[in-house]
Amino acid sequence: MSEGRLTHPHHSRRISVDSGHARIDELDVLRGFALCGILVVNIYQQVVFGGPGGQTGPAAMPPVVQLLFYERFLPIFATLFGVGFGIFLSRAATRSERPRLVLARRLLVLFAIGAVHFVFHPGEVLTAYAALGLVVLLPLSLLRGRAALIVAIVLLFLGSQFILGYGPIPGLLALGYALAVLGAPEALSARTGRIATGFGVFGCLAGLYAYLELTGADLPYVNVIGGPGGGVNLLPVAAAIATAFAYCCGLLLSLRTPAGTVISAVFAPMGRMALTNYLTQTALFLLLSPLVGIESGEDWAQIIVLTVAILALQAVWSTLWLRSFRYGPAEWLWRCLTWWQRAPMRR
């Protein structure tokens, strides 16, 4: 396998009828799983914090949400977006003489979709991913795999210390692209040992941080660039990323167990329709939250009911939809506008 090209997948793949390309099931499962965690945080940010209760930040979240959900699923989405960028670029090169132009149009379409979504969901991530894709990923696509990986690590290290919240995203996008170019997505099924090692390392780091937080330990302030008291504390950011990667490794390992078939059946359809589900989650929690009576963070029972109801609905409808259609509605529109031609929709 050459460093700058993606190989054809061999394990746990589903062939797309119209394109001839194979889907990587593990990536769909990870996307579907990330959707579940993102929903929990979005309900707190858009419904609880924006409601009459007056809470305005993550400190108002229950400790379990802060340690297990807040900023723990954004790294998964960002990395997967970078992976998807790399895979799409490789496949677009087989259909177009100017694949980067096609990819730029794809990102611009996503930015437009995100801009509309932002009206209803301030703080949504699609516009950020699209803009950073144009600014970071397109230039990065001129580099080969190992060079892109070095740039990704540098961006992740620097951005995490300068910008609160969104600082790690450029590095995570670049990391996903570098992994795609190096062939990591295709190798997931054959790398159980490495995934288990990653789960052990990231899980220990995440568990240690959670233990120290819960016991009220005096955690140090770490910022290499800004010095003591300057910039963003790198420790919570690193813990969030470690937790995210531990989740990914643990989920991938679970697919090797007897429960893997069920896990894949639930999460993979949701992941294949990730854009549609991300957009409809906003519509659902804005419409349904007044019906269940969420007014503050104290209404944890209503929050759980709303979260479970939305996820159950999306798991069922994603499965049923994909029995008859090749793409989710938003994915189909995105594809048509990317290639500027009507894509076949029905199976």
Image (cartoon, rainbow, N blue to C red):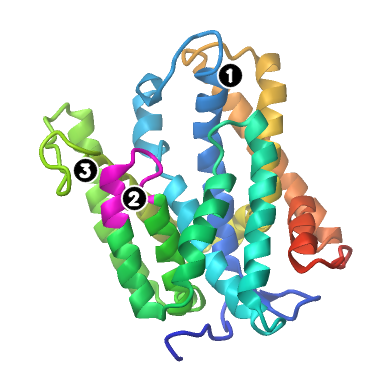
Q: Residue drawn 63% across and 67% down? A: 103
Q: Amino acid at mark 1?
A: Gln
Q: Which residue is labeled 3 in the image?
A: 235
Real-space CA distance between mark 1 and mark 2, rounded to the nearest whole angstrom: 29 Å
Q: Is residue 145 above or below residue 317?
A: below
Where disc 1 sits, the SS reads: helix
- Residue 98 in sight: yes
Find out whether the residues at labels 3 and 1 contact each other: C-beta distance under 8 Å: no
Real-space CA distance between mark 3 and mark 1, rounded to the nearest whole angstrom: 33 Å
The part of the image, by quadrant, that contains residue 11 is bottom right
Q: Which residue is labeled 2 in the image?
A: 241
Q: Which residue is labeled 1 in the image?
A: 302
Find out whether the residues at labels 1 and 2 contact each other: C-beta distance under 8 Å: no
Where disc 3 sits, the SS reads: helix
* Local crowd size for mark 3, using a 10 Å CA cut-off: few (<14), some (14–19), many (≥20): some
Q: How many marks?
A: 3
Real-space CA distance between mark 3 and mark 2, rounded to the nearest whole angstrom: 10 Å
List x then y, in percent, for residue 178: 42, 72
Which of label 1 and label 2 is nearer to you? 2
